[in-house]
Image (cartoon, grey):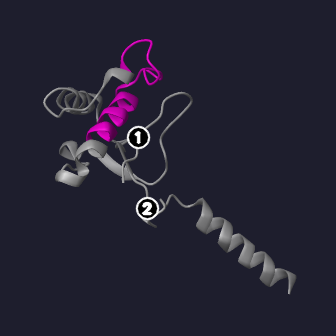
């Protein structure tokens, strides 16, 4: 019987640890694909922070998401900001193949990645 109880507890812990919101939907963030070359990431950042309408103020120098100062990290923040703002109105996490969806919150240290249901 103790093994059965252990299995139940482990299953419950797994269910609790998965990224779901109160509506039972999975939380998803849009991040840069690790295999995307830096020049393509930079093009995605430029579009997201410009024409795309993402708020990229937090990836500027001395702001909470500036470090690590890499194209991949800055692209992840910009892509996610755009995606969260516009996903309910047709916005996607594509960026010409430079981005991907994750269910693991990419927030780190003082850098918070928004999730909007």
Residue at (43% x, 38% y) in the render: 113
Position of 17 compared to 2: left or right?
left
Q: Which residue is mark 2?
A: 26
Residue at (54% x, 27% y) in the render: 110
Among numbered discs 1 and 2, the one appearing first in the sequence: 2
The one of 45 and 86 positioned closer to us in this rendering: 86
Residue at (22% x, 50% y) in the render: 92
Rounded to the nearest whole Å, what is the CA distance between mark 1 and mark 2?
14 Å
Residue positioned most to the left:
51
The answer to which image quadrant residue 72 occupies is top left
Give, as a single range, the part of the protein colored magenta. Answer: 59-82
The one of 63 and 97 positioned closer to us in this rendering: 63
Identify the element where label 1 is drawn: loop
x and y percent of residue 43 in the render? 19, 29
The answer to whether residue 98 is visible is: no
Is residue 116 found inside the magenta-colored segment of the image?
no
Q: Is residue 49 above or below residue 93?
A: above
Q: Quadrant of the C terminus?
A: bottom left
Q: Residues within 10 Å of mark 2 (few under 14, many from 20)?
A: some
The answer to whether residue 4 is visible is: yes
The answer to which image quadrant residue 54 occupies is top left
Q: Which residue is mark 1?
A: 114
Residue positioned most to the bottom:
1
Identify the element where label 2 is drawn: loop
Residue positioned most to the front:
22
x and y percent of residue 67 in the render? 47, 21
Residue at (17% x, 31% y) in the render: 47
């Amino acid at each position: 019987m103790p093994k059965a109880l252990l299995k139940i507890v482990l299953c419950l812990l797994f269910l609790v640890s998965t990224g779901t919101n109160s509506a039972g939907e999975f939380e998803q963030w849009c991040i840069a694909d690790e295999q995307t070359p830096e020049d393509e990431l930079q093009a995605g950042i430029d579009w997201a922070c410009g024409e795309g309408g993402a708020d990229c103020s937090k990836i500027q120098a001395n702001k909470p998401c500036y470090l690590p100062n890499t194209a991949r990290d800055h692209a992840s923040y910009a892509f996610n900001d755009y995606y969260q703002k516009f996903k309910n109105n047709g916005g996607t996490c594509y960026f010409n193949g430079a981005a991907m969806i994750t269910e693991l919150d990419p927030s780190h240290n003082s850098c918070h990645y928004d999730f909007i249901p």
